[in-house]
Image: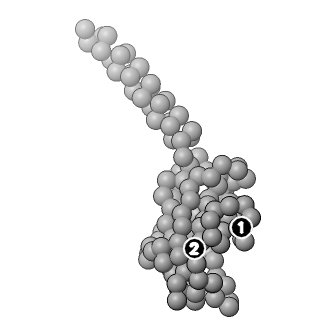
Amino acid sequence: MKKLLIPVLIIVLIIGGGGAAYKYFNGPKIVEIAMTKSVDDKGKPTAPTSTFTSKDTVYLSAKGKKLAIKKATVVWYKGEVLTQNRFKTEENIEISKAGYFNAKLSVPEGLEEGEYGVTIYNGSNDIIEKMVKFQVKN
């Protein structure tokens, strides 16, 4: 009975590990996304919010799976998340050692009041990984 138990356990561990690896690499590559007024030295959001003033610098902080994604593309929208509402695209944003992607939106003359949206993509892929909306109020 003992001789049979060890091979069965090994097979179960291999199947379980293979399933976990498959899910890791084939599931979503971005696992968290936040809008924030600042990020720490690792890229982690320090002041998450969905409302900003026109003078704030707006940061997108997204946590990625370090082994599954190396670069991201971030697209900023004014109004609904529609192609015609895109106003800024940032490509080839590299993941930090801590596993975060960061993008920054700062306008010297200040952001207009209204609704905004941000999407993040895996590299140059055109399928949205995550999307978040935020508001600018004065």
Q: How many marks?
A: 2
Q: Secondary structure at mark 1?
A: strand
Asked if the residues shown at circle 2 and circle 1 are in contact, with their CB atoms under 8 angstroms apart, the answer is no
Amino acid type at circle 2 is Glu
At x 62%, y 52%, the residue is 128
Please, which residue is most extreme toward the left here? Answer: 1
**Lateral position of residue 101 relative to residue 15, left or right:** right
What mark, if any, has residue 100 been given in the picture? none
Residue 134 in the image, given as x and y percentages of width and height = 53, 72
**Lateral position of residue 50 relative to residue 105, left or right:** left
Residue 62 in the image, given as x and y percentages of width and height = 53, 62
Q: Residues within 10 Å of mark 1 (few under 14, many from 20)?
A: some
Q: Residues within 10 Å of mark 2 (few under 14, many from 20)?
A: some
Q: Secondary structure at mark 2?
A: strand
Please tell me whether residue 135 is drawn above or below residue 121 in the rendered image: below
Please tell me whether residue 109 is drawn above or below residue 98 in the rendered image: below
Q: In this rendered view, identify the residue nearer to me: 20 or 97.
A: 20
At x 50%, y 62%, the residue is 33
At x 53%, y 76%, the residue is 135
What mark, if any, has residue 86 been given in the picture? 1
At x 67%, y 85%, the residue is 107
Say which residue label 2 marks.
115
Task: Using the numbered discs, state the Cα–Cα distance from disc 2 to disc 1 in whole angstroms.
Answer: 13 Å
Q: In this rendered view, identify the residue nearer to me: 17 or 89.
A: 89
